[in-house]
Image: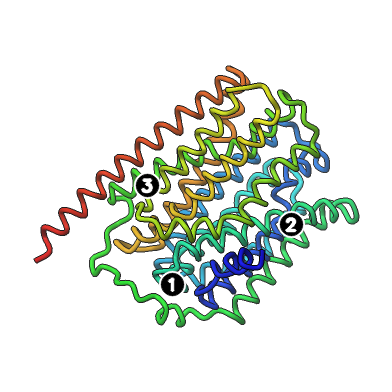
Amino acid sequence: MKKLLQNYFDTFSGLSKEVWWLALITFINRMGAMVIPFLSLYLSDDLCFSLSQIGWIMTSFGLGSLLGAWIGGKLSDKIGYYKVILGSLLLTGVSFFIVQYFTSFWSICISFFVLITIADAARPAFFVALSAYSKPENKTRSLTFIRLAINLGFAMGPALGGLIIATIGYAGLFWIDGITCLAAGFIMINTLHPKKAKILDKEIVVEKPLPAYSDGIYILFLIALTLFGFIFVQYFSTIPLYYKEVHLLSEKNIGLVLALNGALIFIFEMPLIAYLESTSFSKIKKVMYGFVLTGISFALLLITPWTGIIILGMIVATLGEMISFPFGNAFALERSKKGKQGAYMGLYSMSFSVAHILGHNAGMQFINAYGYKNSWIFMCVIAALGTFLLFIVKQKLTKETLTLQLKTP
């Protein structure tokens, strides 16, 4: 047992001090994001909006996320990731204090659109910061460590949020969210310095940067990643409904099944990534394997009505997530060295925003029209299509590498 624990902690060794601070900032920020999980309840219970109105508010939320990712990528290249992250944290904190006072439908749509635009502007900037503060050989593990902080924050946030609602009401969520954003910003001011990045990041950036949108291989990769996001978000919208309506699970048991995802990531992701990094498989091939596993998790639901299959499905889906996301992040960061990192990582963040905008609503509509069984078949087809696109990306990368080798004297 002692050796197992030592091996686990060894997977965190070698990460820079700045990455640890960035993880703490991310953890505090995500732990404070308590409004988001309770947003639909707040809108229905506190403000008495209809389901149709809530749907449009969530759409405005998703559109804000898309715009924020694009703006954040552009600003990261123009004024630097440090100013973007710090500005986003501080302005998001103030915005949380303000949006609670908007109660009409259109004011809610507009205020939450603005809020999430400001908040998600930091997403591509965080990726650029991580690349700058991390040594080249540790980038994938650093990304995994940040994901660990995000998952831990998201796991603790809803529990604290429920307690706050029970004691001081929904208004308390907005105040706590705002305070945690400001706290994360002040920690950043006192612990991270943008000049330090120049010492850590030894990688060479090309003199004539390639515009992100003209990098055909990268765009194809992002399309595949959007398809992956499309099926993965089902685990946060349609899958819980499936657990309740088909397998008749209570909200408590549904919560336990979903919590299994976070627990597995917390315990196994860092050791798994450390092991996979030692293999000879390319990053794209690893993303492909993760995509296949996620598709298999939906196929498992078609095999048997036995309720235990949902546990196996969640384990397989989590394994797919643990492989695809870190190595997908790492490939995007590696590819971004061909051009302006902010623009590249902005497009990367936008691919998941598109997946959220389309995935939840399309999944619900498909289930309503064709039922759960046909929906899971559809998700398997999407997984197969995404895997095929990644295979094409892999082939193009091989061709690109050969071409570069022939040009090199």
Q: How is the image coloured?
A: rainbow
Q: Residue beneath label 2, please?
A: 156
**Does residue 258 appear left or right of residue 269 in this picture?**
right
Task: Kindly give the residue lying farthest to the right in the view shown.
Answer: 167
Compared to 5, does 383 lie above or below?
A: above
**What residue is at 35 percent from the left and 41 percent from the top?**
390
- How far apart are the two marked residues, 1 and 2, measured between alpha carbons? 28 Å
Q: Give the left or right position of residue 225, taking residue 175 as reference.
A: left
- Give the CA distance from mark 1 to mark 3: 25 Å
Question: Of the residues shown, which amino acid type is indicated by label 1?
Answer: Ala
Between 88 and 8, the one nearer to me in the picture? 8
State the CA–CA distance, disc 3 to disc 2.
33 Å
Q: Amino acid at mark 3?
A: Lys
Q: Position of residue 44 (x, y in %)?
A: 78, 38
Q: Which amino acid is tagged 2?
A: Met
Q: Which residue is mark 1?
A: 132
Helix, strand or loop status at disc 3: helix
Whether residue 155 sits left or right of residue 285 in the image: it is: right
Q: Quadrant of residue 122?
A: bottom right
Q: Residue 396 in the image: x percent, y percent? A: 25, 46
Quadrant containing the N terminus is bottom right
Left or right of residue 309, residue 144 in this image: left
Secondary structure under tag 2 reads helix
- Closest to the observer: 171 or 288? 288
Residue 278: image location, x then y, percent: 41, 60
